[in-house]
Image: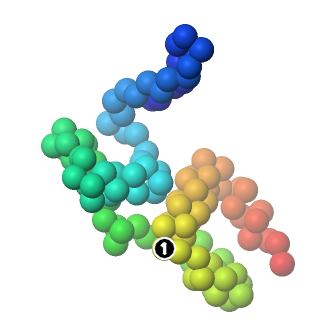
Amino acid sequence: MAGLIPRNGVDMQRFTLRTAKSCWSELNKERCRRLERLGLMTDAGRAVLPDISENGFVIDAEIMQAFQKHPAAWKNFCTFPPLYQRVRIDTIQRDKRKNGSIFLKCGEIN
């Protein structure tokens, strides 16, 4: 868990270890990919990483079905950069797990 700690009028960010069951957002995975590309990832960091391969990201079936019902939305979605696509879908999938009724309600929009 990270938090802002005010010290001498300056906000400083504190970082702590993740728990074993922490959920990694696609944005955090991208930050790890960047650290790897820059040669800044440590062995200790690598040891706790989930699958950060871009191919490891999958859009769940229910969201794909919603896209199939709305081809214009899918066509528009496909124009976004791959990172943006993964981050947006990851947010939807995480929210859907928390409260599936919101996703179902959004699917009713014409």
At x 30%, y 51%, the residue is 35
Q: Is residue 3 left or right of residue 30?
A: right
Instruction: Single out the residue that lies furthest toward the right.
Output: 110
Estimate the x, y position of residue 65 in percent, counting from the top left. 60, 79
The residue under label 1 is 82
Which quadrant of the rendered structure holds the C terminus? bottom right
Q: Return the residue nearer the eye: 106 or 15.
A: 15
The amino acid type found where label 1 is placed reads Pro
Residue 56, picture quadrant: bottom left
Q: 10 Å neighbourhood of mark 1: few (<14), some, or many (≥20)?
A: few
Q: Does residue 71 appear in the picture of this structure?
A: yes
Q: Is residue 51 above or below residue 63?
A: above
Q: Which residue is rendered at x = 68% and y = 89% of the image?
A: 71
The front one of 25 and 63 is: 25
Q: Position of residue 45 (x, y in %)?
A: 24, 42
User: Which residue is at a point 58% across and 63% down the rendered structure image?
Assistant: 88
Q: Is residue 29 visible?
A: no
In the rendered image, residue 34, in percent from the top left (x then y), is placed at: 34, 56
Instruction: Place residue 107 in its image quadrant.
Output: bottom right
Figure quadrant of the N terminus? top left
Q: Left or right: 106 with respect to 83?
A: right
User: For this view, does 39 lie left or right of residue 17?
Assistant: left
